[in-house]
Amino acid sequence: MGLNIRDFYSTEGTVSRGVYLLVGVIGFAIKHNLDRAVATWGFGREWGIFNYWMPLRQVAGIRHLSSNDGLFLAAMVALSLPFIWVGVVMTMKRLRGAGLPMSLMALFFVPFLNLLFFLGLCIVPERERAPGQRLERPSWLARVVPHGAMGSAAVSLLLTVPVGVAIAVFGVEALTNYGWGIFVALPFTMGFASALIHEAREERSFSAAVGVACLSVALLGSGLLLLAVEGFFCILMAAPIALPLAAFGGFCAHAMQLRRWLRNDVPAVLSALLLITPSVQLFEHSLARQSPVYAVRSSIEIHASPEKVWQQVVAFSEIGPPREWLFRAGVAYPIRAEIAGQGVGSERHCVFSTGAFVEPIQVWDEPRLLKFSVTQNPDPMQEWTPYREVRPPHLHGFLVSNGGQFLLTPLPDGGTRLEGTTWYQHGLWPAAYWRLWSDEIIHEIHMRVLTHIRDEVEEK
């Protein structure tokens, strides 16, 4: 169909997938270049693709915005409004043309998943749904997928799990990516594909579609564990983000199957799904992303003077075996601290269960502040695995401590408030999700040390 100005603001009518794709590509190109121009020339800031998810890198919350940051965000939002409206209008037209429910418009506003949503709308053909019309099943699936629920589920898993394992190994081993591709795109597409194949021949229940979707991702994790690509604890940490995305993929496939608009195009959709995750992985690999620096602070009050606490801070004695489940599960834990010399330039070694952190002293303000950098990091954990040893790439350089400090503050009652801080980076994405784990792990490490120092000082 031809386009005129009215088509960009009126929600009536339909639009073909080709026009939808063309408008989307041109619209994004125009918007991205406008955003870069405003950010660069108007505010002196860099602007890239990932700034659409994280426009400001180092802001803890909206209450901490500077006036310049607030003005920048307001300008970018104002610039986005016309493009958002055009996107909403064109997406509504496309949903109507594909015979899809308008409730799917909610996906337009879901970060990252909206990219998969847009891709799907570019693949789905136009549908004129005549009452009682019955669409033919894809011939190759009709020959492969059984009628029975157990048989179709088994075939679905046999087709999707090996492909998922291969894609995950490619991303982890060849590209060393631990990001949106493996943790977001892969679970969603596997859940979508497995449910789609499961329902290709017979209508299944919602619970069956979601169950097969989640089972495919669970088997993916088991496959990575058995192939010694990953360890148990890392797979466990990925499960809270992977399983809901798989379930969402199964839900989307089930909703499409109920509408009966996809039956003839399952091969094309499966082919597109097969390309999504490797494409995201290659895109991530091509970007030189700088991991943000995070800070974790933990504190404890000790009934002793700062002078007494200082001696244990500089080099604390041996800590007993861990009782915390986190450390017993394989996460590296501190054992003791040693130091050679005194003052700035001396070298402190904090010995962990997997090796030692090498910590040159930067600030020696006795008995107030001990600050150090980190020039060597040991492995962050020892993985649970059915094999003697597993060495996944994320154990090397994906969680790195840059430095730390101990701050001793005297209290009115003669005691000391001891605060430990660690500055670190990690190369896992989505960063906000993995920070929940890394912050908690580092806090537990802090508390193991701080509690030991308190007990040692107060017992003397």
Image (spheres, rainbow, N blue to C red):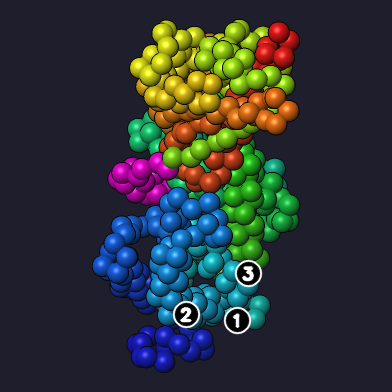
Q: Quadrant of residue 129?
A: bottom right
Looking at the rendered structure, the secondary structure element under dot 2 is: helix
Which of the two labelled residues, at mark 2 and mark 1, occupies the earlier sequence position? 2
Residue 356 shows in the view: no
Looking at the rendered structure, the secondary structure element under dot 1 is: loop
Give the class, few, some or many, for how many residues have Cα within 10 Å of label 2's Cα (few <14, many ≥20). Answer: some
Q: Is residue 270 above or below residue 384?
A: below
Check disc 2 and report the residue beneath it. Answer: 85
Taking the magenta stretch, the answer to whether it contains residue 290 is: yes
Viewer-side residue, 7 vs 141 = 7
Q: Residue at x 65, y 20 (%)?
A: 305
Q: Is residue 175 above or below residue 431?
A: above
Residue 284 shows in the view: yes
Magenta part of the chain: 274-292
Name the main secondary structure of what is drawn in magenta: helix
Amino acid on which disc 3 is placed: Arg
Check disc 3 and report the residue beneath it. Answer: 259
Amino acid on which disc 1 is placed: Ala
- Nearest-to-viewer mark from 1 and 3: 3
Check disc 1 and report the residue beneath it. Answer: 130
Residue 28 is marked as: none
**Residue 135: percent from left, percent from top:** 57, 69
Q: Residue at x 51, y 86 (%)?
A: 11
Q: Residue at x 46, y 61 (%)?
A: 66
Say left or right for 179 vs 42.
Answer: right
Look at the image and tell me in which quarter the C terminus lies.
Answer: top right
Taking the magenta stretch, the answer to whether it contains residue 139 is: no
Looking at the rendered structure, the secondary structure element under dot 3 is: helix
Which of the two labelled residues, at mark 3 and mark 2, occupies the earlier sequence position? 2
